Image (cartoon, rainbow, N blue to C red):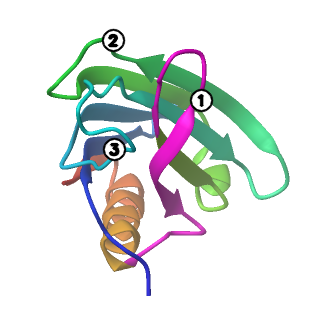
Amino acid sequence: ERDEIGDILMSLHYLPNAKRLNMDVLKVRNLLHEDMTKRLEPLIKVTFHDGKKVVKTKKTGKRNSLTGEFRDTFRLDIGESELEQLTISVGVFSQPRFKESLIGQVSLGRLCSGSEESALWRRLMLSARQGGAGASES
């Protein structure tokens, strides 16, 4: 059984005409990290896997943040058939002085990490088949 501490607030939107997946990372909250006396300087690392290899990786971070608000968009150009094979890994790291430390992660897509993540991905795939829309998670 895994410990589930913290949340990543995000939304996913697939635009079939543009063949683009947009993932908005809005906020991280309720995270535990090694030294609770210091400010959390969260770093988000998003990795897109197509089933065989890493397609794209992007990082974004916030310095001196107590809230963990990001409001960053990660984009991937991908066709609907490739979307079905996609796995998205989202890692949350703390950034204490020149060293990254993983404090949480979640996977969406073909290899989802849990039932909430699987439900989010099913909603996204259903909306993609119906002409595009989005799905959100908290």
Q: Identity of the amino acid at label 2?
A: Arg
Q: Is residue 101 magenta?
A: yes
Check the image and name the residue furthest to the top. Answer: 63
Q: Identity of the amino acid at label 3?
A: Leu
Q: Identity of the amino acid at label 1?
A: Asp
Q: Count of labels shown?
A: 3
Check the image and name the residue furthest to the left. Answer: 67
Q: Residue 87 sits in which quadrant?
A: bottom right
In the image, residue 29 lies at what x, y percent? Answer: 19, 43
Task: Tell me which numbered mark, 3 or 1, is placed earlier along the sequence.
Answer: 3
Q: Secondary structure at mark 3?
A: strand
Q: Secondary structure at mark 2?
A: loop
Check the image and name the residue furthest to the bottom. Answer: 1
Query: For the magenta stretch, what is the residue range?
Result: 93-114
Q: Name the residue tied to disc 3.
A: 12
Query: Which mark identifies residue 116?
Result: none
Mark 1 surroundings within 10 Å by alpha-carbon count, few (fewer than 14), some (14 through 19), many (20 or more): some
Q: Name the residue tied to disc 2.
A: 63
Measuring 51% from the left and 59% from the top, which residue is drawn there? 107
Q: Name the residue tied to disc 1.
A: 77
Measuring 26% from the left and 13% from the top, which residue is drawn there? 64
Mark 3 surroundings within 10 Å by alpha-carbon count, few (fewer than 14), some (14 through 19), many (20 or more): many
Q: Secondary structure at mark 1?
A: strand
Of badges 1 and 2, nearer the viewer stands 2
